[in-house]
Protein backbone atom coordinates (compact mmCIF):
# COMPACT_ATOMS: atom_id res chain seq x y z
CA UNK A 1 0.00 0.00 0.00
CA UNK A 2 1.25 3.50 -0.79
CA UNK A 3 2.94 4.92 2.34
CA UNK A 4 1.73 8.45 1.55
CA UNK A 5 -1.86 7.21 1.60
CA UNK A 6 -1.33 5.43 4.92
CA UNK A 7 0.07 8.60 6.51
CA UNK A 8 -2.75 10.72 5.06
CA UNK A 9 -5.40 8.33 6.29
CA UNK A 10 -3.95 8.22 9.80
CA UNK A 11 -3.82 12.00 10.04
CA UNK A 12 -7.34 12.24 8.65
CA UNK A 13 -8.68 9.88 11.30
CA UNK A 14 -6.98 11.86 14.07
CA UNK A 15 -8.40 15.15 12.77
CA UNK A 16 -11.91 13.71 12.54
CA UNK A 17 -11.68 12.32 16.07
CA UNK A 18 -10.41 15.64 17.40
CA UNK A 19 -13.23 17.51 15.66
CA UNK A 20 -15.81 15.24 17.27
CA UNK A 21 -14.30 15.72 20.73
CA UNK A 22 -14.30 19.50 20.29
CA UNK A 23 -17.93 19.40 19.20
CA UNK A 24 -18.91 17.33 22.23
CA UNK A 25 -17.04 19.63 24.60
CA UNK A 26 -18.64 22.69 23.04
CA UNK A 27 -22.12 21.42 23.86
CA UNK A 28 -21.00 19.65 27.08
CA UNK A 29 -22.79 16.58 25.80
CA UNK A 30 -22.67 14.01 23.01
CA UNK A 31 -24.75 13.80 19.87
CA UNK A 32 -27.30 11.55 21.49
CA UNK A 33 -27.93 13.88 24.47
CA UNK A 34 -28.35 17.35 23.01
CA UNK A 35 -30.11 19.71 25.46
CA UNK A 36 -33.85 20.00 24.93
CA UNK A 37 -33.75 23.69 23.97
CA UNK A 38 -30.98 22.99 21.46
CA UNK A 39 -33.00 20.15 19.89
CA UNK A 40 -36.05 22.41 19.70
CA UNK A 41 -34.07 25.18 18.00
CA UNK A 42 -32.52 22.71 15.58
CA UNK A 43 -35.96 21.31 14.72
CA UNK A 44 -37.34 24.78 14.01
CA UNK A 45 -34.33 25.60 11.84
CA UNK A 46 -34.68 22.34 9.86
CA UNK A 47 -38.38 23.01 9.22
CA UNK A 48 -37.66 26.56 8.13
CA UNK A 49 -34.95 25.41 5.73
CA UNK A 50 -37.26 22.70 4.40
CA UNK A 51 -40.07 25.18 3.75
CA UNK A 52 -37.72 27.58 1.95
CA UNK A 53 -36.33 24.86 -0.29
CA UNK A 54 -39.82 23.61 -1.06
CA UNK A 55 -40.89 27.11 -2.09
CA UNK A 56 -37.90 27.45 -4.40
CA UNK A 57 -38.43 24.00 -5.93
CA UNK A 58 -42.10 24.64 -6.62
CA UNK A 59 -41.33 28.05 -8.09
CA UNK A 60 -38.77 26.55 -10.47
CA UNK A 61 -41.07 23.72 -11.55
CA UNK A 62 -43.97 26.09 -12.25
CA UNK A 63 -41.72 28.40 -14.25
CA UNK A 64 -40.30 25.52 -16.30
CA UNK A 65 -43.83 24.48 -17.23
CA UNK A 66 -44.71 28.07 -18.15
CA UNK A 67 -41.63 29.15 -20.12
CA UNK A 68 -39.10 26.33 -20.32
CA UNK A 69 -35.98 25.73 -18.24
CA UNK A 70 -33.57 27.73 -20.40
CA UNK A 71 -35.68 30.89 -20.14
CA UNK A 72 -35.96 30.76 -16.34
CA UNK A 73 -33.60 33.02 -14.36
CA UNK A 74 -32.72 33.07 -10.67
CA UNK A 75 -34.55 36.37 -10.45
CA UNK A 76 -37.68 34.71 -11.82
CA UNK A 77 -37.40 32.00 -9.18
CA UNK A 78 -36.95 34.29 -6.19
CA UNK A 79 -39.75 36.57 -7.39
CA UNK A 80 -42.12 33.60 -7.70
CA UNK A 81 -41.05 32.12 -4.34
CA UNK A 82 -41.08 35.58 -2.70
CA UNK A 83 -37.65 35.16 -1.10
CA UNK A 84 -34.51 37.26 -1.23
CA UNK A 85 -31.56 36.63 -3.53
CA UNK A 86 -29.29 36.01 -0.54
CA UNK A 87 -31.73 33.35 0.67
CA UNK A 88 -31.53 31.55 -2.67
CA UNK A 89 -27.73 31.55 -2.69
CA UNK A 90 -27.64 30.38 0.91
CA UNK A 91 -29.12 27.10 -0.36
CA UNK A 92 -28.08 26.76 -4.00
CA UNK A 93 -25.33 27.91 -6.31
CA UNK A 94 -27.58 28.21 -9.36
CA UNK A 95 -30.84 27.01 -10.89
CA UNK A 96 -29.23 23.77 -12.07
CA UNK A 97 -28.32 22.76 -8.53
CA UNK A 98 -31.88 23.61 -7.46
CA UNK A 99 -33.31 21.43 -10.25
CA UNK A 100 -31.21 18.42 -9.28
CA UNK A 101 -31.47 18.87 -5.50
CA UNK A 102 -34.70 16.88 -5.45
CA UNK A 103 -32.94 13.69 -6.54
CA UNK A 104 -31.36 13.15 -3.12
CA UNK A 105 -34.81 13.04 -1.54
CA UNK A 106 -36.08 10.78 -4.32
CA UNK A 107 -33.24 8.31 -3.83
CA UNK A 108 -33.92 8.19 -0.07
CA UNK A 109 -37.65 7.62 -0.69
CA UNK A 110 -37.10 4.81 -3.20
CA UNK A 111 -34.47 3.17 -1.00
CA UNK A 112 -36.90 3.20 1.93
CA UNK A 113 -39.61 1.61 -0.23
CA UNK A 114 -37.10 -1.05 -1.23
CA UNK A 115 -36.34 -1.73 2.43
CA UNK A 116 -40.04 -2.06 3.32
CA UNK A 117 -40.69 -4.53 0.50
CA UNK A 118 -37.58 -6.51 1.45
CA UNK A 119 -39.02 -6.90 4.95
CA UNK A 120 -42.43 -8.05 3.65
CA UNK A 121 -41.50 -10.72 1.12
CA UNK A 122 -39.24 -13.73 0.84
CA UNK A 123 -39.38 -13.64 -2.96
CA UNK A 124 -35.87 -12.50 -3.97
CA UNK A 125 -36.92 -11.29 -7.43
CA UNK A 126 -39.87 -9.36 -6.02
CA UNK A 127 -37.39 -7.46 -3.86
CA UNK A 128 -35.76 -6.08 -7.01
CA UNK A 129 -39.01 -4.23 -7.76
CA UNK A 130 -39.58 -2.77 -4.30
CA UNK A 131 -39.00 0.76 -5.61
CA UNK A 132 -40.91 0.60 -8.89
CA UNK A 133 -44.45 1.57 -7.87
CA UNK A 134 -43.13 4.49 -5.82
CA UNK A 135 -41.10 5.57 -8.85
CA UNK A 136 -44.11 5.53 -11.18
CA UNK A 137 -46.22 7.41 -8.64
CA UNK A 138 -43.51 10.03 -8.33
CA UNK A 139 -43.33 10.35 -12.12
CA UNK A 140 -47.09 10.85 -12.31
CA UNK A 141 -46.89 13.62 -9.71
CA UNK A 142 -44.43 15.52 -11.94
CA UNK A 143 -46.06 14.72 -15.28
CA UNK A 144 -46.48 18.38 -16.25
CA UNK A 145 -42.82 19.08 -15.53
CA UNK A 146 -41.73 16.09 -17.63
CA UNK A 147 -43.81 17.33 -20.58
CA UNK A 148 -41.97 20.65 -20.39
CA UNK A 149 -38.46 19.17 -20.51
CA UNK A 150 -38.81 16.00 -22.60
CA UNK A 151 -36.73 16.05 -25.77
CA UNK A 152 -34.61 18.91 -24.50
CA UNK A 153 -31.08 18.91 -23.08
CA UNK A 154 -32.49 19.36 -19.58
CA UNK A 155 -34.69 16.29 -19.99
CA UNK A 156 -31.70 14.23 -21.09
CA UNK A 157 -29.72 15.35 -18.02
CA UNK A 158 -32.65 14.53 -15.73
CA UNK A 159 -32.97 11.03 -17.19
CA UNK A 160 -29.24 10.47 -16.81
CA UNK A 161 -29.39 11.47 -13.15
CA UNK A 162 -32.41 9.26 -12.60
CA UNK A 163 -30.69 6.35 -14.31
CA UNK A 164 -27.75 6.63 -11.92
CA UNK A 165 -30.04 6.52 -8.87
CA UNK A 166 -31.99 3.52 -10.15
CA UNK A 167 -28.85 1.61 -11.07
CA UNK A 168 -27.60 1.96 -7.48
CA UNK A 169 -30.90 0.73 -6.02
CA UNK A 170 -31.44 -2.14 -8.47
CA UNK A 171 -27.75 -3.05 -8.59
CA UNK A 172 -27.63 -3.82 -4.87
CA UNK A 173 -30.48 -6.33 -5.17
CA UNK A 174 -29.19 -7.94 -8.37
CA UNK A 175 -25.70 -8.32 -6.94
CA UNK A 176 -27.12 -9.99 -3.82
CA UNK A 177 -29.08 -12.42 -6.01
CA UNK A 178 -26.13 -13.15 -8.29
CA UNK A 179 -23.90 -13.98 -5.33
CA UNK A 180 -26.18 -16.88 -4.41
CA UNK A 181 -25.12 -18.77 -7.51
CA UNK A 182 -23.46 -18.49 -10.88
CA UNK A 183 -25.71 -16.16 -12.88
CA UNK A 184 -25.86 -16.75 -16.60
CA UNK A 185 -25.78 -12.99 -17.28
CA UNK A 186 -23.43 -10.51 -15.55
CA UNK A 187 -25.14 -8.52 -12.75
CA UNK A 188 -24.34 -5.18 -14.39
CA UNK A 189 -26.07 -6.25 -17.60
CA UNK A 190 -29.16 -7.38 -15.67
CA UNK A 191 -29.20 -4.09 -13.74
CA UNK A 192 -28.98 -2.02 -16.92
CA UNK A 193 -31.76 -4.09 -18.48
CA UNK A 194 -34.11 -3.51 -15.54
CA UNK A 195 -33.37 0.22 -15.30
CA UNK A 196 -33.57 0.88 -19.04
CA UNK A 197 -36.83 -1.08 -19.21
CA UNK A 198 -38.30 1.04 -16.45
CA UNK A 199 -37.15 4.30 -18.05
CA UNK A 200 -38.58 3.13 -21.36
CA UNK A 201 -41.94 2.45 -19.69
CA UNK A 202 -41.72 5.81 -17.96
CA UNK A 203 -41.10 7.70 -21.22
CA UNK A 204 -43.87 5.84 -23.05
CA UNK A 205 -46.33 6.48 -20.19
CA UNK A 206 -45.52 10.18 -19.98
CA UNK A 207 -45.99 10.55 -23.74
CA UNK A 208 -49.08 8.31 -23.88
CA UNK A 209 -51.21 10.35 -21.51
CA UNK A 210 -53.15 9.47 -18.37
CA UNK A 211 -55.11 6.46 -19.65
CA UNK A 212 -53.14 4.16 -17.33
CA UNK A 213 -52.56 4.59 -13.61
CA UNK A 214 -49.21 4.24 -11.90
CA UNK A 215 -50.40 0.85 -10.63
CA UNK A 216 -51.26 -0.26 -14.19
CA UNK A 217 -47.86 0.72 -15.54
CA UNK A 218 -46.05 -0.89 -12.63
CA UNK A 219 -47.93 -4.14 -13.19
CA UNK A 220 -47.04 -4.15 -16.91
CA UNK A 221 -43.41 -3.40 -16.09
CA UNK A 222 -43.23 -6.34 -13.70
CA UNK A 223 -44.97 -8.74 -16.08
CA UNK A 224 -42.48 -7.89 -18.80
CA UNK A 225 -39.27 -7.91 -16.78
CA UNK A 226 -39.60 -10.47 -13.97
CA UNK A 227 -39.34 -13.55 -16.24
CA UNK A 228 -36.25 -12.07 -17.90
CA UNK A 229 -34.53 -11.51 -14.55
CA UNK A 230 -35.30 -15.04 -13.42
CA UNK A 231 -33.90 -16.42 -16.66
CA UNK A 232 -30.79 -14.24 -16.51
CA UNK A 233 -29.99 -15.37 -12.97
CA UNK A 234 -30.05 -19.06 -13.89
CA UNK A 235 -26.56 -20.56 -14.23
CA UNK A 236 -25.19 -20.69 -17.75
CA UNK A 237 -25.18 -24.15 -19.32
Image (tube, rainbow, N blue to C red):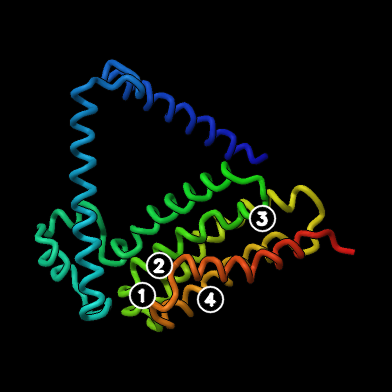
Would residue 118 be found to the left or right of residue 99 on screen? right
Report the front residue among 81 and 210. Answer: 210
Q: In the orientation shown, which residue stands out farthest toward the right?
A: 237
Of badges 1 and 2, nearer the viewer stands 2
Q: Are marks 1 and 2 in contact (CB under 8 Å)?
A: yes
Would residue 78 be found to the left or right of residue 169 on screen? left
Looking at the rendering, which quadrant does residue 9 occupy?
Answer: top right
To which residue does mark 2 refer?
139
> What separation in Å lies between label 2 and label 3 (alpha carbons)?
23 Å
To which residue does mark 1 refer?
146
Residue under the point 20% across and 52% down = 90
Looking at the rendering, which quadrant does residue 3 occupy?
Answer: top right
Would residue 179 be found to the left or right of residue 204 on screen? right
Marked residue nearer the N-terminal end (1 or 3) = 3
Q: Are marks 4 and 1 in contact (CB under 8 Å)?
A: no
> What separation in Å lies between label 2 and label 4 (alpha carbons)?
13 Å
> What separation in Å lies between label 3 and label 4 (alpha carbons)?
20 Å
Task: Indicate the secondary structure of the residue bearing disc 2.
Answer: helix
Residue under the point 26% across and 59% down = 93
Marked residue nearer the N-terminal end (2 or 3) = 3
The circle drawn on residue 200 is 4
Marked residue nearer the N-terminal end (3 or 4) = 3
Amino acid sequence: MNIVFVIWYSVHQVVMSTSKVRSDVLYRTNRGHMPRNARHAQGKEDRRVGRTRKLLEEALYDLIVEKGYDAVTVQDIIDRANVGRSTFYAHYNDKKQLLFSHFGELEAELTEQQRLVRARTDDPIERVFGFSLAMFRHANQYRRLWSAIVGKQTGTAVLRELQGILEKIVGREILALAQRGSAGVPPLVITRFVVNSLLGMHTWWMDEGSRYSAEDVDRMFRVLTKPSIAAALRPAR
